[in-house]
Image (spheres, rainbow, N blue to C red):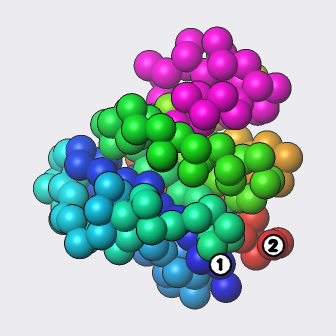
Amino acid sequence: MAKIATLITNMFEDSEYMEPAKAYKDAGHEIVTIEKQAGNEVTGMKKGTKVKIDKGIDEVMADDFDALFIPGGFSPDQLRADERFVKFTKKFMDAKKPVFAICHGPQLLITAKTLEGRDATGYTSIRVDMEYAGAKYADKEVVVCQDQLVTSRTPDDIPAFNRESLKLLNRN
């Protein structure tokens, strides 16, 4: 089963973390939450969901994981201000490992300059940013690109996001 790195900090979209994380765990995959420091507790923006951080970014390497999960909310925008999270994200994309990003999650992919020529989607307010980054934006509930990248737009798309993410995990 896959070991999934999850980049998350305060103001994440509760359902965009909780529902996929549950689906991945229920399928037997391991979720490892990563933020600035292990032991921190981060809080969701709508329901106040608390998530304990397993590892600090300085303790992990992309090579230790099979896939990357980036939930939305304001979390990805905050994380992309820290070059360590950007480099970590880029390593997954460059290594062609599965990457799952929902809503504002693609902001980390934009900053990592890894969307050029890729089919992708995201929250409507980052559409232009994604297009400037070279993505071929599609306004669809889920977009799968090159059997590596799974993106979705909003919490309404979570069932399709989970379905396609799990399909990809089962192939690898």
Q: Position of residue 104 (x, y in %)?
A: 45, 35
| Farthest-out residue, left | 48
**Mark 2 Cα-neighbour bin, 10 Å: few <14, some 14–19, many ≥20:** few
Q: Nearer the viewer, residue 92 or 16?
A: 92
User: Relative to 148, is 41 on the left or the right?
Assistant: left
| Residue nearest the observer in this picture, 136 or 134 | 134
Residue 54 disc label: none
Q: Amino acid at mark 1?
A: Ala
Q: Amino acid at mark 2?
A: Asn
Q: Would you say 33 lies left or right of 25 here?
A: left
CB within 8 Å, label 2 to label 1: yes
Task: Name the element at disc 1.
Answer: loop
- Residue 152 in view here: no
Q: Residue at x 44, y 19 (%)?
A: 125
- Which quadrant of the view contains residue 134? top right
| Occupied quadrant, residue 164 | bottom right
Foreground: 84 or 155? 84
Vertical side of 101 occupied by 25: above or below: below
Locate the C terminus by quadrant: bottom right
Q: Can you identify the residue that label 2 sits on? A: 172
Residue 19 spot, x, y in % from top left: 41, 64
Q: On the rendered image, what quadrant is the N terminus found in?
A: bottom right
> Which dot marks residue 2?
1
Q: Position of residue 59 (x, y in %)?
A: 45, 68
| Mark 2 to mark 1 CA distance (whole Å) | 8 Å
What range of the chain is rendered magenta? 108-135
Query: Magenta segment: does it hold 40?
Result: no
